[in-house]
Amino acid sequence: MNSIKNIIAVEWKNIIRTKTAMVLIGVFAVLLLFSAFIGIENKVEQNSIRHKYQEQVHDDYVNQPDRNPHRVSHYGYLVFRERPALSFFEFGIESFAGNSVFLEAHRQNTVNLSEAGFSNGMLRFGELSIALILQLLVPLFIFFIGYGTLADLKSNGVLKIMLAQGVSAKKLILGKTLGIFSFTIAVFIGALLLIFTIAFAVYPEELTAAVLMRSIFAVGLYTLYFFICSWVTVLISAKSSRGGTALISLIVMWMLCGIILPKMAQNVGQVIFPSISKLEFETHIAEDLEQIGDSHDPEDAYYNTFKAETLAEYGVDDVKDLPFNYVGHLMAEGERITTQLYRAHFDELIDTYDKQNSIAAYLSFVDPYLMLRNLSMAVTGTDMAHYLDFQKQTEAYRHEQTQYFNELHKNEIDSKQSGTQRLDSSRFKQRGTFQYNKRGLLWALSNQLTTLLALLFWVMLIVFSFFFGFKKIKL
């Protein structure tokens, strides 16, 4: 144990003595502070704007004059998507996902107005976020401070002397790994904790129990990622004859894991599981709806059957004799059918997206960067699953609102004045504003089961290597 502690202490001294390493730490400190400031300011500003217009939309909605309920359902309602509390740290798909959706009767609209839609093509190269620095740039720092940790000792003959003195290869690799890892977390995890502390001290209303749990998991996740990077660095250095060879190998590995494989996963997913366009999506729904029937066609077979069944149920011969307004009843049935078709096609589309994303999830078993990226977005609530969940909840709200007004039309509008009779505006004020039901950490992780298995695989691989893999390794 003392020998391992000594190795760790020596590794710290070597890193601190390296002037370039100290300069890099200063550069990273500036980048982290800059990205934290931009991330926090952007998140707060975006949420402030969205809250402002959400209140304005709701006020305009509930202060409508007396209207026919069907007109109110077509008046519509605009919902804005709030940015998650940890989106200042991990941007995820926030810049590419829409932030508002218009809800109206008989039509399901997509979430629109993404930041990417109003920016130039430079956004394709990514945005500087705290997560991006920790995911891609910090591994380069680890590679730089550790590429020669064993390779240099091997080339100058010191390694042979240490092995001759009884220091085992296992202890050397463990001590070097822990030395690089402990220095890295002291600098970067310490900086991350400081940023989180300042962010939540300035905006304490954001720090809920759920956000705290997500933050703790995120810190643990990045800590493990840095250990993996340190472990890989020492292994490459141990198997290299010179430091320069180790550095080239590590840079090639960084390019493969951080750039090539993620892009390949995206392209392969799109080729194997092609998704349809928005126009094709809407066309498929319209074609299926046409096969079922058209509520506006008096000769339509489906709705004539629906009408006959309704008349038989109430024992009358004409819709005028029904105890309610048949037009409202008919609109409710039409809304039920279109919603059912939309949800079926939407689920198919989501299934296609899941299959596309599964390529990156499977590659997480060989690429720790993909493993971290997927889990980081899930934990911070900036992944596709949270975005789709928002869309599903707004669609449920839209359907509930529309059916409420259809029921008003059915039960309170005279059938002789279906298109002209108005109801008191107080009936509209009874409807509350949309409230997104925020999901917990377990729900977020349940959408990343394959990636979680990859995380477990990396942990088991590291444990196995230290307990069994380094006993016969030759340095």
Image (cartoon, rainbow, N blue to C red):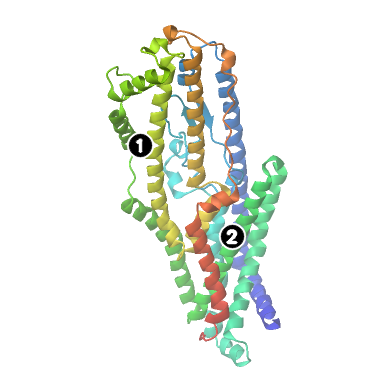
152 is higher (above) or lower (below) than 274? below
Residue 46 is situated, as x and y percent measured from the top left of the image, at 57, 36
| Left or right: 73 as drawn, with respect to 34 | left
Residue 295 is situated, as x and y percent measured from the top left of the image, at 34, 21
Measuring 54% from the left and 77% from the top, which residue is drawn there?
465
133 is higher (above) or lower (below) than 282? below
**The N terminus: image quadrant:** bottom right
2 is higher (above) or lower (below) than 22? below
Residue denoted by label 1: 278
Label 2 neighbour load within 10 Å: few <14, some 14-19, many 20+:
many
Q: Secondary structure at mark 1?
A: helix
Residue 78 is situated, as x and y percent measured from the top left of the image, at 51, 27
Cα separation, mark 2 vs mark 1, equals 37 Å
Q: Residue furthest toward the front?
A: 315
Q: Secondary structure at mark 2?
A: helix
Measuring 49% from the left and 29% from the top, which residue is drawn there?
398
Circles 2 and 1: CB distance less than 8 Å? no
Residue 177 is situated, as x and y percent measured from the top left of the image, at 59, 74
Q: Earlier in the sequence, mark 2 or mark 1?
A: 2
Label 1 neighbour load within 10 Å: few <14, some 14-19, many 20+:
few
